[in-house]
Amino acid sequence: MKIIILGAPGAGKGTQAEIISKHLQIPTISTGNIIREALKSGSEMGQKAKEYIDSGRLVPDDVVIGIIQERLAEPDCKDGFILDGFPRTIPQAEALDRMGVVIDRVIDIEVDDDVIARRVSGRRVCPGCGASYHLEYKLPEVEGVCDNCKDTLVQRKDDQPETVRERLRVYHEQTEPLKDYYAAKNKLFVVEGQEDVADTTRLTLAALEANL
Ligand code: ADP
Ligand code: ZN
C-alpha cells in the first residue's frame, strides 16, 4: 500500500504513520525528519532549509521533491510506504503524480487549531534519535530523558508558540487544498483526531480497511 498521512502540524501524523508502518511492515518516510537529519549533519541542503524551518515556513518545493524522489528509489520502498509530511503543497502532489507514484489512500487527521497549539507546546523530542514525547500524553520512562538513547529531550525551535501559529497559517493556506485534490481522485479518508492516541489509532486502522 502507498499511503499519505495529511494533517496540520501537531495533529499526530507522525504517531499514526509509525503505527501503520509497524502494522503493514512498510517504511514511513518523513520529510521533516529527513530535513532535520540533514540540518544536524551540516549538509548544504540542511543549511538552506534551516531558516525556513525555524521560521515555520515550508522548505521550497524543488528541495523536498528531490528528497522524496531519492528516497522512494530505495529498495525498501518497493512494496509500499507511508508518506508523513509530504506532499504539503499542490505542486508537490503534482510532482508525485509525475513520478508515476500511484497512491492508494490518503488519511487526513483533523484536529482543531486550538487543540494543536496546546499539544505542540508540550511536545519534546530527542536530538539523538528523533523520538517524540509529550509532557501530558507520552511521557518518557525517566523525565526529560529519551527511552532509546538516554539523550536529554528538547523542545523543537519551531514548536514555540509564535512559530506554531505561523505553521498553522501556512498549513491552511498551502496544505489544506490537498484535501480537495485527493477527494477529487476519490482517495481521501478523514479521521477525526481524538484526545486519546489509541482512539485515533483505531479510527486510522479502520480507515485503512474501509471501502472508499
Ligand atoms: P510538522 O508536521 O509537525 O509541522 P514536520 O517534522 O513534518 O513537522 O516538518 C517540520 C518542518 O520541515 C516544516 O515546518 C517545514 O519547514 C519542513 N518540511 C517538512 N516537510 C516538508 C514538505 N513536504 N514541504 C516543505 N517543507 C517541509
Ligand atoms: Zn533518542
Image (cartoon, grey):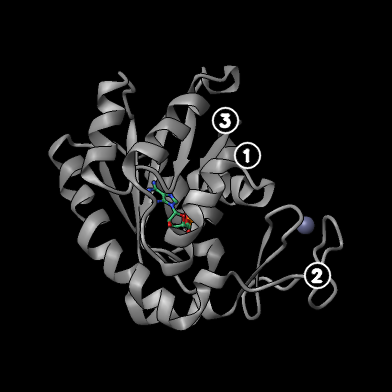
Identify the residue at horizontal 68%, vertical 55% (top origin): 130
Q: Which residue is mark 1?
A: 22
Distance between the Cα atoms at labels 2 and 3?
A: 29 Å
Q: Position of residue 89 (x, y in %)?
A: 26, 47
Query: Quadrant of the image for the C terminus?
Result: top left
Residue 182: in sight, yes or no?
yes
Q: In the rendered structure, which disc, 2 or 3, sits on the residue that comes first in sequence? A: 3
> Which residue is labeled 2 in the image?
152
Label 2 residue SS:
loop
Distance, label 1 to label 2, CA atoms, is 26 Å
Amino acid at dot 3: Ile
Q: Is residue 160 above or below residue 181?
A: below
Q: From the viewer's perspective, is residue 208 above or below residue 170?
A: above
Q: Which amino acid does the dot numbered 1 rest on?
A: Lys
Q: Where residue 16 sits: x, y (%)?
A: 51, 52
Q: Is residue 27 left or right of residue 183?
A: right
User: Does the numbered disc 3 mark a residue whose Cβ is under 8 Å from ligand 1?
Assistant: no
